[in-house]
Image: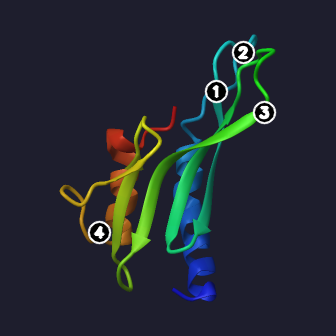
């Protein structure tokens, strides 16, 4: 994909990101656990990522305030066709080609919004 195509796709995907943001619960006070505070998206190489941004629970040994964890990774494989992967608890991306292979963008949106693999916590 060209830079212009990537920018256009990122604008299109912002609607999906906004829908995922609706699932974020307010930060509890006092905060005792890591808590999702935002959903963000970005291109990195040939992949488009939608990630959760977490606020780290307060603890003297924590050295950072935020971290990111993946929700979905999209790989364009045509003009309107994608392969998708979910972020495992192991820190690795796992392809879902056996269930979702060569999806249209509309099918990607439906899967991300409805499938348990892609929940926002």
Left or right: 86, with 96 as reference point: right
Measure how far apart labels 3 and 1 are at the Cα level.
Answer: 14 Å
Q: Residues within 10 Å of mark 3 (few under 14, many from 20)?
A: few
- Name above or below for residue 76 compared with residue 21: below
In the image as oriented, which residue stretches furthest toward the left?
Answer: 98
Disc 1: which residue: 35
Q: Is residue 9 left or right of residue 66?
A: left
Q: CA distance from mark 1 to mark 4?
A: 31 Å
Indicate the quadrant where residue 96 lies. Answer: bottom left
Q: Nearer the viewer, mark 4 or mark 3?
A: 3
| Marks 4/3: CA–CA distance | 37 Å
Q: Compared with residue 63, is residue 43 higher up or lower down, i.e. above or below? A: below
Mark 3 element type: loop
Which of the two residues, 101 or 10, is positioned nearer the viewer here? 101
Q: Which secondary structure lies at badge 4?
A: loop
Identified at 52% across, 31% down, the residue is 121
Q: Which mark is residue 103?
A: 4
Please name whichever residue, 63 or 78, is drawn nearer the observer in this view of the structure.
63
Residue matched to label 3: 64
């Amino acid at each position: 994909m060209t830079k212009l195509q990537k920018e256009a796709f990122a604008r299109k995907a912002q609607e999906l990101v906004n829908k995922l943001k609706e699932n974020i619960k307010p930060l509890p006070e006092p905060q005792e656990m890591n808590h999702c505070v935002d959903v963000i998206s970005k291109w990195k190489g040939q992949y488009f990522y939608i990630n959760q941004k977490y606020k780290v629970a307060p603890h003297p040994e924590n050295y950072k305030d935020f971290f990111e964890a993946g929700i979905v990774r999209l790989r364009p494989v045509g003009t309107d066709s994608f392969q998708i992967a979910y972020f495992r608890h192991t820190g690795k991306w796992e392809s879902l080609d056996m269930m979702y292979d060569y999806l249209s963008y509309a099918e990607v949106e439906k899967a991300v919004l409805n499938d348990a693999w892609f929940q926002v916590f």
